[in-house]
């Protein structure tokens, strides 16, 4: 048999690579166009202060979106992230203000709790055979209630200077939350691409049964993904509490929508198995930029919601069309 | 002179990096059963998908009843009387038989579904096919054979003049194939033209009038089946001599590696006893639905069972999940490649790597070079036709997909291989390659349980044969005394005093 493998190999992987690149560049392109548009409409947009403001804002959602990428790649979903932000935020504020003021405890305990809630979400949905949509709908309510309970119905304000660094500090010209966000993007990208854990996430999301029969411990990976997401939600809770200088009762409300939108706009399939965290980065930035631009233009909040919703649908439609083009 | 119903003229189809069809020209007569054969990836499925509008041709022409056609979708093709049964089932499990048959063209009265009429018409069709299926039962409750019949009824519900069948027997057992052939003969008499794709050459000789051979996307020949010797047909398909079709090598059987005692899962498996030895190939024959697949899945820890014991190398084990089975050196090649064997979205390399990733990783990081090297070895050893290691598995032809599933387990050395229909949908040449790989595994000391519906394969490759019927082991036959009739008798429940009943 002749060996066509060698000669054909380069050519096709180039084509494949082109499509993969095109997959990413599509969203990137939309992002650039939107930026330029806002830049023309309102000159303040490109002001460095505004740009810093936007990416700092985006970081809070973005950190969670990185974790959500893992869960959605597995074909799952988590609605409880906003409540986890509030609950871990209030715990952090509690340790800062009421329970001794230890910086160490007010960081570590919330992160552990966040991871724990994620673990619980994953554990109940896999071992109990429930759809994570239902389980996290439950925990979403539970931890919003728990937040109110711990706070006794009032926000907890007044953090220490060192704690405030998490949300408001700068390293050189770059806000610390941005470093946390980009850091988690890079680490997640490396995990997804280079580790067994990452490859198995794609495998399970692509075909759970085949993954199981190949000897992959499916439940373990799912629980891990939810745990990572819970942990990152807690990180977001720390950033938010630190930035607001207060543990707020309504913190994180509605975050799940922006988080899921970021992931999906970034090209990760809700069916699982396809996508990645760089897309999520752009997705989160796109959403942030749109809110910011519309604010600067003085567009009414109602209209903002309508515009945002339309853009989400449009972005996903374009993604779909690209995919069809790819398989043809 | 026969009347031409379909004609292909320099038909070409290119996919990125692959020429699936290269200037293919031949024709099909009205009312004949026309076989389309060729190796995996030869372009058979692509050709029919162009006819039915699933794919668009790159160049060339297709003439249907003298007119050039270019359907945009299977819907267009159906409207014009061309129906196809694809390599995979396209039925909706939760709906009834009648609904599935008329899917896409429900009978309506006003705005509502006309159930009575639909059931009536469905019953008429099934009567016409002379099969006994309740039109109100749900498709998920039916066996493979009946599903296949429903696919046929669905195709006929469009008054198809041309019916294309892509490997319709791949999931069927002997007896069900007989029914299918009866239906095909019957349709032929009613004037329907049939294009029949299969890797089972016996079938081509039994049911087809003419055969067209494709190789690497190119047309090789169209011949009346009667004028063609099987050796010649195989040579045309693979372009070389294949030699022995079942290259069995005998090995000295070693000690027992797996023993199953009294395995029972009510309603599915009953008191199963098996003893498997090193360097042994144990064949398991039986009808579809006789519990063969369930047995393998029980041993592998996928499905729970209630009573019984499993011993590995003399030690009793409790296997409750596939990872545990694998750590004991057991591998399962599942029955359905698309839903159980492969991650279609991922690349050839990613799929081949699935079971071995943890073994070639440092602190969780994959050794990419090593992975690539193993991938290349496997593609070479299994002769997998793919433009690159990074091609998504979903774009490979059916048989090459099957080779990837196999390659996955050859890449990870195991002691006990459970093979469920290992050569389903695989071409003659590749089958031989797989048998040789099985021989290699055995010579390296492994043991194999092979479930297969292809009797010639079971007869030729097994050291011992177990026949299952209705969840029980109906008999055990030695290699020397085994023959087709004996096994069929056991599988169907006929009495036979030659067989030892354990
Ligand atoms: N959608 C697609 N994209 C890219 N390549 C494809 C696509 N579909 C088929 N191919 C390639 O075209 C060639 C012909 O495939 P086809 O499915 O027609 O083979 P086949 O003769 O039906 O094989 P088998 O007997 O294994 O089913 C193969 O090399 C396959 O990898
Ligand atoms: Mg095919």
Image: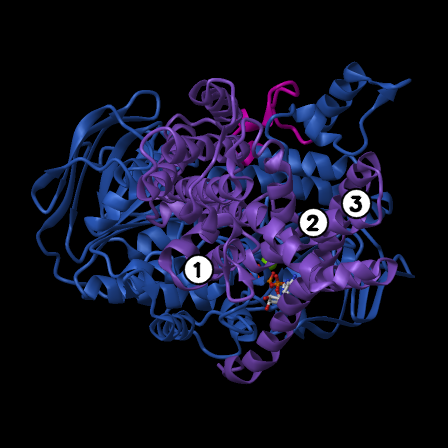
Q: Colour of chain A?
A: purple
Quarter occupied by residue B432: bottom left
Q: How far apart are marks 2 and 1 (CA)?
A: 22 Å
Ligand 2, by image quadrant, is bottom right
Question: Quick one: SS at disc 3?
Answer: loop
Give the residue number, with chain letter if any, for mark 1: A187
Are the two marked residues, 1 and 3, in contact with CB atoms closer than 8 angstroms? no
**Image quadrant for the C terminus of chain B?**
top left
Q: Which residue is drawn at 40% across and 73% down?
A: B372
Q: Where is residue B143 in the image (x, y as percent from the top left)?
A: 51, 31
Report whether mark 1 lies on the same chain as mark 3.
no
Q: Nearer the viewer, mark 2 or mark 3?
A: 2
Question: Quick one: SS at disc 2?
Answer: helix
Q: Residue A287 — which label?
A: 2
The reply to whether residue B448 is in sight is: yes
Q: The blue chain is which one?
A: B
Chain hosting mark 2: A
The residue segment tinted magenta is B129-146
Observer-nearest of B200 and A274:
A274
Q: Nearer the viewer, mark 1 or mark 3?
A: 1
Q: Which callout, 2 or 1, points at the residue further toward the start of the chain?
A: 1
Q: Residue B191 — which label?
A: 3
Q: Distance between the residues labelled 2 and 3?
A: 61 Å
Question: Quick one: SS at disc 1?
Answer: helix
Q: Residues within 10 Å of mark 3 (few under 14, many from 20)?
A: some
Q: Residues within 10 Å of mark 1 (few under 14, many from 20)?
A: few
């Amino acid at each position: 048999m002749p060996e066509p493998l060698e000669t054909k190999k380069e050519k096709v992987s180039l084509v494949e690579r082109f499509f993969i690149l095109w997959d990413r560049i599509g969203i990137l392109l939309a992002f650039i166009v939107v930026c330029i548009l806002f830049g023309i409409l309102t000159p303040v947009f490109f002001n460095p202060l505004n740009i810093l403001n936007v990416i700092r804002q985006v970081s809070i959602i973005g950190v969670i979106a990185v974790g959500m990428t893992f869960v959605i790649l597995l074909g799952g979903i988590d609605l409880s992230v906003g409540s986890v932000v509030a609950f871990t935020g209030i715990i952090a504020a509690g340790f800062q203000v009421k329970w001794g003021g230890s910086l160490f405890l007010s960081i570590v305990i919330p992160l552990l709790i966040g991871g724990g809630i994620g673990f619980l979400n994953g554990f109940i949905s896999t071992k109990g055979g429930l759809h994570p949509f239902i389980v996290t709908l439950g925990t979403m309510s539970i931890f919003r209630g728990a937040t109110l309970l711990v706070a006794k119905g009032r926000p907890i304000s007044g953090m220490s200077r060192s704690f405030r660094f998490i949300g408001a500090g700068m390293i050189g010209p770059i806000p610390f939350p941005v470093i946390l966000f980009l850091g988690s993007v890079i680490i997640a990208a490396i995990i997804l691409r280079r580790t067994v854990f990452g490859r198995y996430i794609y495998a399970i999301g692509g075909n759970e049964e085949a993954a199981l029969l190949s000897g992959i411990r499916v439940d373990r990976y799912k629980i891990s993904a939810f745990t990572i997401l819970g942990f990152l939600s807690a990180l977001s809770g720390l950033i938010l509490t630190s930035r607001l200088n207060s543990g707020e009762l309504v913190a994180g409300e509605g975050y799940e929508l922006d988080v899921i939108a970021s992931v999906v706009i970034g090209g990760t399939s809700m069916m699982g198995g396809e996508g990645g965290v760089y897309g999520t980065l752009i997705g989160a930035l796109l959403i942030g930029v749109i809110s910011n631009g519309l604010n600067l233009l003085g567009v009414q909040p109602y209209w903002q919601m309508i515009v945002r919703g339309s853009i989400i649908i449009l972005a996903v439609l374009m993604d779909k069309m690209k995919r069809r083009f790819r398989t043809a | 002179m026969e009347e031409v119903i379909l004609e292909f003229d320099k038909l070409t189809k290119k996919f990125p990096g692959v020429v699936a069809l290269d200037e293919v020209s031949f024709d099909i007569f009205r009312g004949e059963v026309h076989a389309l054969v060729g190796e995996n990836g030869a372009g058979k499925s692509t050709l029919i998908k162009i006819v039915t509008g699933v794919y668009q041709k790159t160049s060339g022409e297709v003439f249907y009843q003298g007119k050039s056609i270019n359907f945009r979708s299977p819907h267009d093709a159906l409207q014009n009387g061309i129906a196809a049964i694809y390599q995979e089932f396209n039925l909706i499990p939760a709906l009834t038989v009648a609904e599935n048959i008329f899917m896409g063209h429900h009978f309506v009265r006003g705005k509502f579904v006309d159930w009575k009429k639909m059931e009536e018409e469905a019953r008429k069709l099934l009567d016409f096919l002379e099969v006994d299926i309740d039109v109100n039962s749900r498709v998920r409750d039916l066996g493979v054979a009946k599903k296949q019949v429903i696919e046929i009824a669905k195709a006929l519900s469009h008054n198809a003049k041309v019916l294309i069948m892509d490997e319709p027997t791949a999931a069927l057992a002997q007896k069900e194939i007989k029914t299918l052939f009866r239906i095909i003969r019957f349709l032929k008499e009613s004037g329907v033209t049939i294009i029949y794709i299969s890797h089972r050459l016996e079938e081509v000789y039994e049911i087809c009038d003419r055969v067209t051979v494709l190789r690497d996307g190119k047309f090789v020949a169209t011949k009346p089946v009667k004028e063609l010797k099987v050796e010649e047909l195989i040579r045309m398909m693979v372009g070389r001599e294949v030699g022995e079709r079942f290259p069995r090598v005998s090995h000295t059987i070693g000690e027992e590696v797996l023993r199953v005692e009294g395995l029972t899962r009510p309603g599915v498996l009953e008191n199963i006893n098996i003893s498997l030895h090193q360097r042994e190939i144990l064949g398991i024959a039986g009808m579809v639905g006789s519990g063969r697949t369930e047995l393998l899945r029980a041993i592998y820890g996928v499905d729970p069972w209630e009573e019984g014991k499993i011993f590995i190398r003399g030690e009793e084990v409790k296997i409750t999940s596939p990872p545990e089975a694998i750590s004991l050196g057991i591998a399962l090649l599942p029955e359905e490649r698309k839903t159980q064997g492969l991650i279609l979205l991922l690349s050839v390399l990613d799929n081949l790597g699935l079971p071995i990733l943890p073994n070639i990783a440092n602190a969780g990081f994959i050794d990419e070079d090593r992975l690539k090297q193993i991938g290349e070895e496997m593609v070479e050893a299994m002769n997998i036709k793919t433009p690159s290691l990074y091609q998504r598995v979903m774009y490979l032809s059916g048989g090459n997909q099957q080779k990837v599933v196999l390659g996955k387990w050859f890449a990870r050395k195991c002691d006990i291989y459970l093979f469920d229909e290992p050569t389903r949908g695989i071409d003659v040449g590749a089958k031989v390659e797989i048998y040789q790989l099985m021989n290699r595994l055995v010579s390296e000391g492994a043991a194999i349980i092979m479930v297969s519906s292809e009797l010639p394969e079971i007869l030729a490759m097994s050291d011992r044969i177990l026949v299952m019927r209705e969840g029980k082991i109906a008999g055990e036959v030695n290699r020397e005394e085994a023959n087709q009739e004996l096994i069929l008798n056991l599988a169907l429940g006929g009495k036979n005093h030659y067989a030892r009943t354990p």
